[in-house]
Amino acid sequence: MTDLGRALLIIALVVSAYAVFAALYGARGGGREWVTSSRRAIYSVAALLTLAGVLLESAFLRNDFSFGLVADNSSTTTPIFYKLTAMWSSQSGSLLLWVWVLALFSSLVLLATRGSLREITPYATAVLGGIATFFCALLVFKVSPFTAIANPPAEGAGLNPLLRHPSMMFHPPMLYSGYVGFSIPFAFAIGALITRRLDAEWIRATRRFALIAWAFLSVGILLGARWSYSELGWGGYWGWDPVENASLMPWLVGTAFLHSVMVQEKRDMLKVWNASLIVTTFTLALLGTFLVRSGILDSIHAFGASTVGGWFLALIALVLVGSIVLIVSRLDDLRSPHRLDSLLSRESIFLLNNLALVGLCFVIFWGTFFPLISEAVTGERSSLGPPWFDRYTVPLALSLVLLAGLGPLLAWRRVTVSYLRRALGLPAAVAATACVALALFTDAAQSVTSLILFTFAAFTVTAVLSEYWRGVKARRTMSSDSYPAALISIVRRNRRRYGGYAVHLGVVVLLVGVAASSAFKTERDVRLRPGQTAQVGGYDVRYVRPTSGLSNEKLEFGAVLDVRKDGKRVTLLRPSRSYFASQDASMGTFGRFFRGESTSEVGLAPGATRDIWTAVQPDLRLLNAPLREANRRFADAPGDVQALVIAALSERYVRRAPPATFRVIVNPMVTWIWIGGLIVLGGALIALWPSALAARRRVTSLYAAKLGRELSRA
Amino acid sequence: MDPSRKRTIRLAVALGVAVLLAGALVYTSFDAATEARQPSELLAGAAAGKSYELTGKVADGSVQRGGEVLHFRVRDRGGTASVPVQYRGTVPDPFREGREVIVKGRLHDGTFVAQKDTLVTKCPSKFTKKNSS
């Protein structure tokens, strides 16, 4: 079966290389049928990779341990959900996922543009085919997902316990779809540069894909944060770790791109800038894919020293050098006839927002790669911690929040000062009121940056809501719609605009959550015996009793915590720690059940104003002596006896109830980070949903084109 | 003033600000960075009171939990030189003997006193091959 998979990959490699050749040959005078053939070749690559993916997934489902990948990442006891998703917990599996998603996206965009963009499409097809060729070659020659095991083991190694969390399973495909999605606008930008068709046509054709990629990347990043918060046992959602940074960088530049292309569409400006932004975004997406498997930076996500680093560096260098040469050689065609009319205009706010986003990306890039930079400069490998990142990212994020409210208020071209005064009046008044109220009635003033952020957030939320309000009012003067009907109607007529505003709201809500939870969290590490109580942030946390649990793949030791405020019970939490049996025989027959990989299961009481987050570190030292004895006496006992011994050992922990170490965090407003994320996703969906109006226009124009063809033939 | 001159001035100001900011970035990063050392390098010469980032592997049989304090030794990745470490705070899930760790702190009388919550364990990776099992 593994041979079939390998054969599929080899055919996919050949077909995608053919697509590159056919597209280029067709564009260079070989005729349209070659271009059509190259498009169909890309469809075939998508079909071949789908087959390969299904083959691999079915091997996981069938527990076919003759697949090396299955034996390493799955076992018969792995739940079905994790079997289905274990494919991307390995390097080769995730590379297969990458190119699979790429082929699907490419097919979609080529299907959508098959009647238009006749000059650009062949080159875009060649670029997409080239990227697919690269990844297929990687899978065929370097890291095969279809390695065969001659003597398949009876049981697989199982999935890494740390990854057993639903959001961790959705996180990689989301992130990859985001990374991969940006290759579509990139490919069309390259096509536009090569053919010198540098109006906004390529942007309009790929806008939706850029937005889809952006939405996937946003969700992917947030799922990673969510996983870190609820699975990693340290209670944080973001740590400026290289791998996190690697996913944030393309997001930032991609966000800048989504804004500045609007300036090109409306004003025919910023063409060099837009081409550079999409090249940067795609390069950073490749870098993000590469960084995870390069081993060049220290991260909690251990990057195994991998063999594909050189290949990736070569591809990144090729993309960068090729794009720069292209852009520089087309500078004359990229020059815009228009200039910025006024600093008081929407396009200048977009420009500022772009500078802030790119600046943010640069800061993060510098901080992430600082160990390499400092090693090159001073010979010492040094790293930068979160305080350094915060120093630059906080003011930039603050300015972005303000700009998110200013942009929607200003019109294109220029606005007069009196218009500005009228437009800014209400949001500024609300912001000032919010600032004073927060300073007087809450503790917000203790953190100046948070207070500024809340003030800016109030400004932006008011500004965006008043934009909705203005639209609804205008609609109601024209029709007799009720308020909700008017709202739905304006959103449907201008999905991109109002969807975008919703995204602004979501980002602001998210940042409010981030600011509140990082400035005002209370955290304590305490060691408690059953019955003892600790005070954390106004809550009394009592360790009621220890717990233990047994299942066929793990042991669990935990605690019941009674959380009270002013004597009244708020919630009962059950944090625990799971111990996954190790295959390492040197730990002893029983030792391997207690000393294997362990993961925190967080006890979490989420709330609108605060989360109560708890994790436990049980002290298993009292089991040392009994374990040694059990290893000696029952090593050769039959399976059911051994199970009884394990049950007795875990029972002993509960009975003796030694003190355990707890981490308790009272974390304000974390929930709003996830709510903000959902609003962002909703806004993005509104913006990218095909509007009925555009569909009608497309149908009419297709009809007109057909009519024109028939008339010319007549 | 004619518009093209105005634009040149605007560009010059913008570039100037960008250069200044980049300068600040570079300067502060070298200032705020903590040097990474392996145990043998740390023992060979560590400035008193200076903060370092210790990297290496957790030495076998060295992990001891005493109440809230965790004691262990970190040894060179490819050697035997090791430093005792005293640590408080969260212990990452994958922390075990033989694993690669990074921890921040200062050398104090031959013991590496770590800052709270700075221990980072490289997980046995979702991307590396398990070689033991």
Image (cartoon, coloured by chain):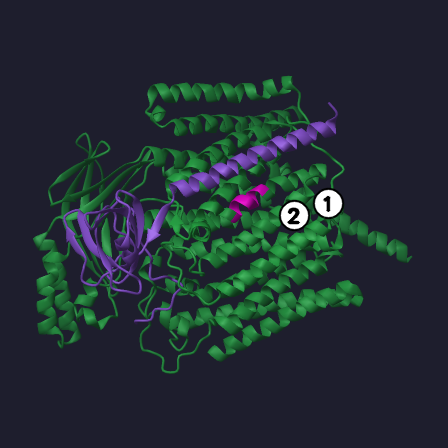
Chain colours: A green, B purple
Q: Chain of mark 2?
A: A
Rendered view: A340 above or below A102: above
Is residue A407 magenta-colored? Answer: no
Q: Which mark is residue A275?
A: 2
Amino acid type of the residue tagged 1 in the rendering: Leu
Tell me the chain of label 1: A
Helix, strand or loop for the magenta stretch, by majority: helix
Spatial CA distance of label 1 from label 2 is: 9 Å
The residue positioned farthest toward the bottom in the image shown: A150
Residue A401 visible? The answer is yes
Earlier-in-chain disc, 1 versus 2 = 2
How busy is the neighbourhood of tag 1: few (under 14 within 10 Å), some, or many (20 plus)?
many
Q: Nearer the viewer, residue B39 or B99?
A: B39
Specify whether residue B94 is in view. no
In the rendered image, which residue does mark 1 sit on? A334
Q: Quadrant of residue A712?
A: bottom right
Q: Residue at the spot x=58%, y=68% of the render?
A: A47
Rendered location of residue A213, percent (x, y): 55, 50
Q: Residue at x 65, y 39 (%)?
A: A262
Label 1: which secondary element: helix
Answer whether labels 1 and 2 touch (C-beta < 8 Å). Answer: yes
Relative height, residue B7 to residue A119 (above, below): above
User: Residue A553 in the image: x percent, y percent?
Assistant: 26, 65
| Quadrant of residue B59 within the rendered picture | bottom left
Is A234 left, or right, of A373 in this rendering? left
Residue drawn 14% across the image and 48% down it: B67
Quadrant of the image containing the C terminus of chain A: bottom right
Q: Is residue A34 left or right of residue A663?
A: right
The one nearer the camera, A485 or A276, is A276
**Image location (x, y in percent) of residue A383:** 39, 48
| Highlighted range, magenta | A250-256
